């Protein structure tokens, strides 16, 4: 998949395709290996979950019970989980799994051309916070999202890193994103170091919509919750 191609959202637990040649690759310590020219901006350890957002409901589709390693770069956000089990909250259709290269590892990513907004719901002091990275999708009003949860200070810092990285990515790549003058002004504000205090929803102009993998992902009825265990490396992203 090339950098200007809309991704598939392969339900319910991934944003990249099995043959995606820009999927996450890991070094021998299982850390993200940046691509040539890619710059790491920050590393975190947080909980991760996948959501589908609709006009009147928010559905958690899957979650991992243990924290994962989260890496923010100037091109994407990636997560790596090891030795965990992935709980499917809704959506039991099993998909063919690509061959695993590293047993017990799960990874995922969102590239910066995809997110349409960030959501950081207000929380009480000393309670965990959550950052939702939300993408628009073609031919549906449902919006897939990744949620990262943890200590409020770390989640707020992650949100600031993501906001600035997305804005700079789009401002410096006119060949990928056709921005209006108004959209450029908004992204220039988003690229600044300010906290944007009080903002719980931050729009990110210039996003490319994602695409679901099959019509089943659009029309599947809601089944009973299920639990999957023992996923290996191919379960959540194409390349390791």
Image (tube, helix red, strand yellow):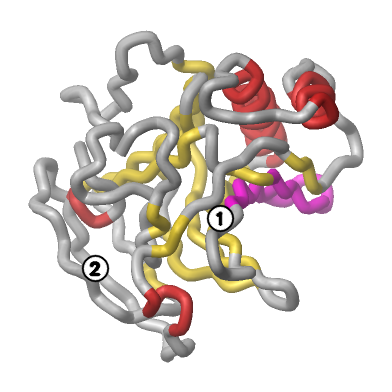
114 sits left or right of 12 in the view: right
Q: Which mark is residue 229?
A: 2
Q: Residues within 10 Å of mark 2 (few under 14, many from 20)?
A: few
Position above or below: 178 against 118: above
Q: Residue at x 59, y 30 (%)?
A: 177
Residue at 30 percent across and 62 percent down: it is 85
Residue 195 seen in render: no
Q: Are marks 2 and 1 in contact (CB under 8 Å)?
A: no
Circle 1 Cα neighbour tier, 10 Å, few/some/many (<14 / 14–19 / ≥20)? many
Residue 114 in the image: state x and y as whole percent. Answer: 54, 42
Which residue appears at 73% of the width and 20% of the height? 191
SS of the residue under disc 1: strand
Locate residue 12: give its quadrant: bottom left
Q: Which residues are magenta?
A: 117-135
Say which mark, if any, is on residue 145.
1
Please report the residue visible at 63 percent of the width from the left and 69 percent of the height from the top.
Answer: 141
Sequence order check, earlier mark of 2 and 1: 1
Residue 225 is one of the magenta-drawn residues: no
- Mark 2 vs mark 1, CA separation in Å: 22 Å
Asked if residue 64 is positioned above or below residue 226 in the image, the reply reads: above
Visible residue check, residue 133: yes
Q: Quadrant of the N terminus?
A: top left
Query: Disc 2 or disc 1, which is closer to the eye?
Result: 1
């Amino acid at each position: 998949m090339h950098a200007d191609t809309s991704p598939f959202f392969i339900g319910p637990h991934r944003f990249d395709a099995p043959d995606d040649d820009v999927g996450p690759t890991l070094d021998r310590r299982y850390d993200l290996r940046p691509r040539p020219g890619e710059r790491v901006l920050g590393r975190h350890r947080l909980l991760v979950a996948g959501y589908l957002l609709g006009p009147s409901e928010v559905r958690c589709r899957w979650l991992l019970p243990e924290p994962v390693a989260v890496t923010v770069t100037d091109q994407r956000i990636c997560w790596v989980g090891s030795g965990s089990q992935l709980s499917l909250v809704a959506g039991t259709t099993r998909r063919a799994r690509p061959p695993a290269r590293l047993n017990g590892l799960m990874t995922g990513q969102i590239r910066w051309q995809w997110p349409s907004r960030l959501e950081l719901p207000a929380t009480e002091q000393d309670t965990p916070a959550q950052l939702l990275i939300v993408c628009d999708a073609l031919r549906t009003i449902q919006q897939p999202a990744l949620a990262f949860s943890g200590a409020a200070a770390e989640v707020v810092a992650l949100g600031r890193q993501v906001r600035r990285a997305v804005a700079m990515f789009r401002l410096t790549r006119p060949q990928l994103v056709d921005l209006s003058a108004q959209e450029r002004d908004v992204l220039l504000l988003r690229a600044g170091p300010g906290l944007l205090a009080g903002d719980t929803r931050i729009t990110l102009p210039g996003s490319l919509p994602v695409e679901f993998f099959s019509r089943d992902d659009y029309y599947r009825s809601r089944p009973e919750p299920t639990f999957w265990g023992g996923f290996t490396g191919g379960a959540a992203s194409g390349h390791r």
